[in-house]
Image (cartoon, rainbow, N blue to C red):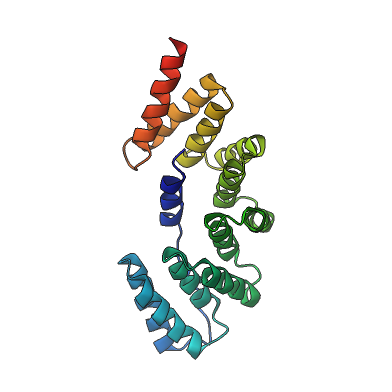
Amino acid sequence: MKIKNIFSLLISSLIICIICSNYAQSQQTGFIQQAYSSIQSKDYKKAVELYTKAIENNKNYAAAFYGRGLAYFYIEAYTEAASDMNDALRIDPNYVEALYSLGLIFTKAAKFDEALNAFTRAIKMKQNYVEPYYGRAVAYHLTKNYEKAIADYSAAIGLNSSYALSFYGRGAVNRILGRNDDAAKDLERYLDLNGNNDNLAAEVRRILKEINEDKN
């Protein structure tokens, strides 16, 4: 399973949630907009600087901490990223996107207990939020807790039957467990949904070829 590819897709699915505040200054809003543009253009260090300016103007602006945490995540400054996500949650305890992002940060930093805790809290906070189920499934997958991984991949599919990555993940786990028929069905469904739209397609076809060769 190409974990690096999965993370690149997970990260690209993150959406910066700009929270409008009644007390936000117009200059602060400008910093947020510029920082968001910097992230889109992959100038992450500039994004950190701009979010920091927004935070200096208002230390209770959860979206600025969230955005800076995401920028830190992209440059693999995981300690700073986690700290900022926790600050966003301190300001807004219901900031479920920050909890989900915290789970991703801990997963990428190989702190799996913390990651599982963050994803589980996000699920409890918003039970129809598909991404934390998928994120938790990946964490279980990485720690070889395969049955729990399958359960969470399946939960994500139950919430969104077009969530292609969950079919890929479940198929990969079924392949590991030797459930080749189930693996093939999931991987074929992944291709039906995504085709060649991401860099996992070649990996999926490779696994399907292996399954077919095993049958012969």
**Looking at the picture, does residue 147 appear above or below residue 8?**
above
Question: Is residue 151 left or right of 26 when viewed as pictured?
Answer: right
**Looking at the picture, does residue 127 appear above or below residue 186?**
below
Along the viewing direction, whichever of 9 and 109 lies nearer the viewer: 109
Q: Position of residue 5 (x, y in %)?
A: 41, 46
Can residue 201 be seen by looking at this rendering? Answer: yes
Q: How many marks?
A: 0
Along the viewing direction, whichever of 184 and 27 lies nearer the viewer: 184
Can residue 18 be seen by looking at this rendering? Answer: no
**Looking at the picture, does residue 211 appear above or below residue 134?**
above
| Rendering quarter of residue 61 | bottom right
Question: Is residue 183 left or right of 213 when viewed as pictured?
Answer: right
Q: Position of residue 133 (x, y in %)?
A: 60, 47
**Looking at the picture, does residue 154 appear above or below residue 44?**
above
Q: Position of residue 155 (x, y in %)?
A: 61, 40
Q: Position of residue 117 (x, y in %)?
A: 68, 56
Q: Quadrant of the C terminus?
A: top left
Q: Residue at x 59, y 47 (%)?
A: 139
| Rendering quarter of residue 153 | top right
Q: Residue at x 42, y 27 (%)?
A: 207
Residue at the far top in the pictured view:
216
Q: Residue at x 62, y 39 (%)?
A: 144
